[in-house]
Amino acid sequence: MVVYTSSRVSFEGSRRPRQQLYVDQPQAGLLGQKKPFVIDASRVARLPINRDYFPDLRDGSVPTRGQDPRCARAVVDRIRDLIAEGFVVVPVDLTTPPKSSG
């Protein structure tokens, strides 16, 4: 599973949109990133584990550049909260081949 991220941490308006989680500099470092970023919990996709999506794939394993279980838990919790509040989260599953029209 992957979520959309952006290093553009500024936003318009008085409050950050509820689907965005801000990742500060120290937490970004734990995740293998050099600067703060935002995670958009409303944009989630499941990707196939192959070289098209993960060019550094080694023996069926995607290299890990960083890890922070608290951040992963925060994303899951935010997704659950959004769904509970009626926010529509549309799943994107790229692991299943498209159906043929024949």
Image: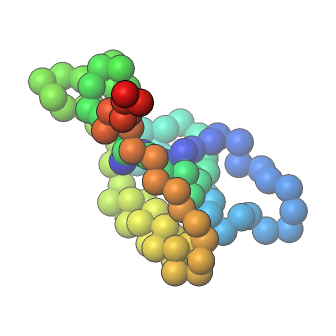
Place of residue 41 in the rendered image (x, y in percent of width and height, measured from the top left)? 54, 58
Q: Nearer the viewer, residue 96 or 101?
A: 101
Quick check: 20 above or below 65? below
Quick check: can you spot residue 71? yes
Q: Quadrant of the C terminus?
A: top left
Quick check: can you spot residue 26? no
Quick check: 96 above or below 87? above
- Furthest residue to the front? 102
- Furthest residue to the right? 13
Place of residue 60 in the rendered image (x, y in percent of width and height, measured from the top left)? 15, 29
The residue shown at (38%, 59%) is 72
The residue shown at (60%, 46%) is 37
The residue shown at (45%, 47%) is 92
The residue shown at (77%, 50%) is 10
Place of residue 15 in the rendered image (x, y in percent of width and height, measured from the top left)? 79, 68
Q: What number of labels is visible?
A: 0
Place of residue 82 in the rendered image (x, y in percent of width and height, measured from the top left)? 56, 73
Q: Nearer the viewer, residue 68 or 51?
A: 51
Left-right relation of 58 to 85:
left
Quick check: 70 above or below 56? below
Q: Quadrant of residue 71?
A: bottom left
Left-right relation of 10 to 55:
right
